[in-house]
Amino acid sequence: MEIRLTDTEAQTANKAYEKLGLANRLNILQEELGEAVAAVSHFRRGRLNAQSELAEELADVLVVIATLLPQFEPDIMYWVHAKFERLNDRLKKLETIAPQ
């Protein structure tokens, strides 16, 4: 899986940050994260159409994160790689202790 923005989407993300600013983008991120949390609850309870709802809310979060990249990109990518490395280490440990 790879998430890649088109050139137009990347330009729109940059423009959103430039025009709306950091405070706005952080407020919107907070709102979208809250909506994503609610969608996770609906999904876990088996609510009708919950998978589609959750996918939409996760997409909203990703879009807002994309608009924040101009401010945080070097740090975000450092931490993304570090977190995936840590996850990979945890998975390797599970493989060694899991019954075959």
Image (cartoon, helix red, strand yellow):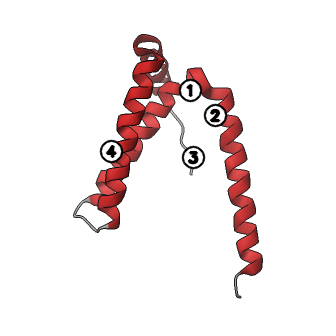
Q: Is there any visible trace of residue 68 in the rendered image?
A: yes
> Callout 1: helix, strand or loop?
helix
Q: Mark 2 = which residue?
A: 76
Q: Residue at x 67, y 30 (%)?
A: 75
Residue with the mark numbered 4: 35
Residue at the top extreme, as displayed:
19
Looking at the image, which residue is at 46% across and 38% down? 62
Asked if marks 2 and 1 touch (Cβ < 8 Å), the reply is: yes
Where is residue 92? Give x, y as percent.
Answer: 75, 68
> Residue 51: image x %, image y %?
33, 59
Q: Residue at x 30, y 67 (%)?
A: 45
Q: Which amino acid does the dot numbered 2 rest on?
A: Ile
Residue named by callout 3? 2
Q: Amino acid at mark 1?
A: Leu
**Badge 4: few (under 14), some or many (20 or more) residues near its Cα, within 10 Å?**
some
Whichever of callouts 3 and 1 sits on the residue coming sooner in the sequence is: 3
* Cα separation between marks 1 and 4: 21 Å
Residue 79 x %, y %: 68, 40
Compared with 75, 92 (above or below) is below
In this view, the mark in front (3 or 4): 4
Check disc 4 and give the amino acid type: Glu
Q: Which of the two residues, 7 or 46, is positioned nearer the viewer here?
A: 46
Question: Residue 33's mark?
Answer: none
Quarter holding the C terminus is bottom right
Q: In front: mark 1 or mark 4?
A: 4
Measure the C-alpha gap from mark 3 to mark 1.
17 Å
Amino acid at pointer 3: Glu
First-in-chain label (1 vs 4)? 4
